[in-house]
Amino acid sequence: MVEDCAVGRHTLLVTFEPQSDGQREPREPHLHAQAVAAGSVAALVQQCAAELDLDLGDVRCGDERNRLRWAGVVGTVPDRKEFRVVLGASGWELFVSTDAPPIECVSGRTGDLHEVVRAAAAWRRGAMPREVKAVAPFVRLPELAEAHSRGPADAVAVMWRLLRDRVARPRVESVLNLSLRSLVEAAHAEPKLSLLYPFTSHWTLKFSTCTRYPYSRNVPFIEPLSDGRLRVHAPTGRHIIKVADTAEQAVGLVVANLPAGCGPAVAGTVSDL
């Protein structure tokens, strides 16, 4: 569910499309053979960067078993994790992923390794997703990433809408799914909670006072139970505040136990609070 967006890794996925004849071959000819000739994916990426006069620093190479599978480009700014380029086993896919927070997720499809290297170089120097797209037009920006680029209020609003949409269409109808749906709607209807950044984890609905992962853990959270009731946990999860009979009661308990000065979620991670 939406928790995967909230706590997963932001990934730039670049796929070499098949030729028009339907064969699973990259438009960039003999990509795997080029990596073999270069000695590794890292070397191939460095060669491409040199052609474009771009600095990727020391491109990290996989071990002997993986040298023809992936390479890593390390960011130069704080919290900018490794940008990993992975050549698919079939030789027709190239994945570019990072360990950066999910709100910086981008995706795309291209047949041009040069475009991938331009994206990697922009990411390495600290460019935000929209700036990466400016130098590598194939990049697509997901709605949540664009919202974060506009500010925390937009990020909160979009995350709430995505969460509400997701729980409204569960894969399987169950007591827990129905309970979570009513809980999300009740929490969104509460003005004080609708200003916080929502996320789910193991069937619990949580609220953060910051919009980037790692999120804050200073607000009580709610766990739907299989009998339709809802358990309200203290922020640390170490004790239970109360078990509520309805979503509205559970939301009221969270509001009654909000930390002092709890206002709209702010941009950044818990370390920025």
Image: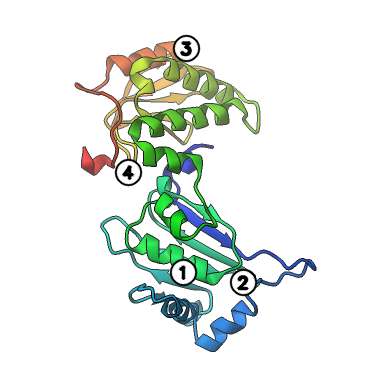
Q: Which mark is residue 117?
A: 1
For the point 49% across and 80% down, the residue is 44
Establish if 104 lies above or below 118. above
Disc 1 versus disc 2: distance between alpha carbons? 20 Å
Q: Which mark is residue 246?
A: 3
Disc 4 versus disc 2: distance between alpha carbons? 33 Å
Q: Secondary structure at mark 1?
A: helix
Establish if 46 lies above or below 85. below
**Residue 171 quadrant:** top right
Lower position in the chain sequence, tag 1 or tag 3: 1
Lower position in the chain sequence, tag 4 or tag 1: 1
Disc 3 versus disc 2: distance between alpha carbons? 51 Å
Tell me the crowding category of disc 3: few under 14, some 14 to 19, or many 20 or more residues within 10 angstroms, Cα based.
some
| 219, 239: nearer the viewer | 219
Q: Nearer the viewer, mark 4 or mark 3?
A: 4
Q: Is residue 136 left or right of residue 32?
A: left
Q: Nearer the viewer, mark 1 or mark 2?
A: 1
Residue receiving disc 2: 89
Tell me if label 4 and label 2 are in contact, CB under 8 Å. no
Establish if 234 lies above or below 143. above
Tell me if label 1 and label 3 are in contact, CB under 8 Å. no
Q: Secondary structure at mark 3?
A: loop
Tell me the crowding category of disc 4: few under 14, some 14 to 19, or many 20 or more residues within 10 angstroms, Cα based.
some
Lower position in the chain sequence, tag 1 or tag 2: 2
Q: Position of residue 235 (x, y in %)?
A: 29, 29
Q: Which mark is residue 214?
A: 4
Lower position in the chain sequence, tag 4 or tag 3: 4
Q: Nearer the viewer, mark 1 or mark 3?
A: 1
| 211, 152: nearer the viewer | 152
Disc 4 versus disc 1: distance between alpha carbons? 29 Å
Tell me the crowding category of disc 2: few under 14, some 14 to 19, or many 20 or more residues within 10 angstroms, Cα based.
few
